[in-house]
Image: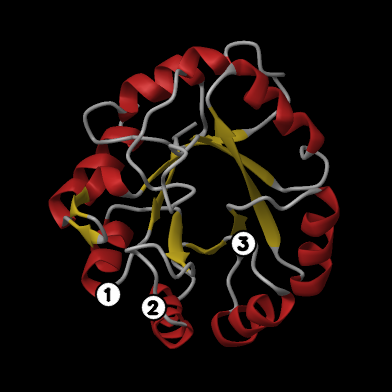
């Protein structure tokens, strides 16, 4: 089975076109003000229309309130919400009911103890995404280009169908897939030349590397 790919933090049609040309599966749009990848809802609406169902549109939010989530739902109509904050089980259930969308719950990993937290969410969130825990002084919960120890995933339950993020690049994504068995890989900073600025060549290289296994 070919590995699926998510490119997160896309901000223009040119980069989206490259990702779609090479059969990306998920396009991530960031709605979090401190992020260099943040976009407005109006820009998100335009970009989601450009995707035009050729890939799943993922709206990344961080501890967002209901009114903001509903604005995204009404204007952008994403397929999935990626919950990158401190959302608990009850909050995930609320968002699922409010939007009728799938959810990705992000688990921030520094040790195997963090990985075990995923089990709380496996029957609530539609997808689990393991990402590196951000440094304590970081304003961003993800997208920091940090790789966590993939060995922490060795004993994860076989029924947990997870996504993998955290410092993935065209150079290491194949090793990441071999090491973890991840069926979906996700990158943002790993295909950038500067924070928030994607490189079409790196986007192509990442997708090709992940899907060539």
Relative to 107, residue 90 above or below? below
Q: Nearer the viewer, residue 19 or 169?
A: 169
Q: Which callout, 2 or 1, points at the residue further toward the start of the chain?
A: 1
Label 3: how many Cα within 10 Å (few below 14, some 14–19, many 20+): many
Residues at badges 2 and 1 in contact (C-beta under 8 Å)? yes
Label 2: how many Cα within 10 Å (few below 14, some 14–19, many 20+): many
Residue at image mark 1: 13
Residue at image mark 2: 47
Q: Which callout, 1 or 3, points at the residue further toward the start of the chain?
A: 1
Query: Which residue does the image show at 26% across and 41% down from the upper left?
Result: 206
Q: Which callout, 2 or 3, points at the residue further toward the start of the chain?
A: 2
Q: Quadrant of residue 80?
A: bottom right
Relative to 163, residue 70 above or below? below
Residue at image mark 3: 80
Label 1: how many Cα within 10 Å (few below 14, some 14–19, many 20+): some
Q: Quadrant of residue 63?
A: bottom right
Looking at the rendered structure, which numbered label has been put on residue 41? none
């Amino acid at each position: 089975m070919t590995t699926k790919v998510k490119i997160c933090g896309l901000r223009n049609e040119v980069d989206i076109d490259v990702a779609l040309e090479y059969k990306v599966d998920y396009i991530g749009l960031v709605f979090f003000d401190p992020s260099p990848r943040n976009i407005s809802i109006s820009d998100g609406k335009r970009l989601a229309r450009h995707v035009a169902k050729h890939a799943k549109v993922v709206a990344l939010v961080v501890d967002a309130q209901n009114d903001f989530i509903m604005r995204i739902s009404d204007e952008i109509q994403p397929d999935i919400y990626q919950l990158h904050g401190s959302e608990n089980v009850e909050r995930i259930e609320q968002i699922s009911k409010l939007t009728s969308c799938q959810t990705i719950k992000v688990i921030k990993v520094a040790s195997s103890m963090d990985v075990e937290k995923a089990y709380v969410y496996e029957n609530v969130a539609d997808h689990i995404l393991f990402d590196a825990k951000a440094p304590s002084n970081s304003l961003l919960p993800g997208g920091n280009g940090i790789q966590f120890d993939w060995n922490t995933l060795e004993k994860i339950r076989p029924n947990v169908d997870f996504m993998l993020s955290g410092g993935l690049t065209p150079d290491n994504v194949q090793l990441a897939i071999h090491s973890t068995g991840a069926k979906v890989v996700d990158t943002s900073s790993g295909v950038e030349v500067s924070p928030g600025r994607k490189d079409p060549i790196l986007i192509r290289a990442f997708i090709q590397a992940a899907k060539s296994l």
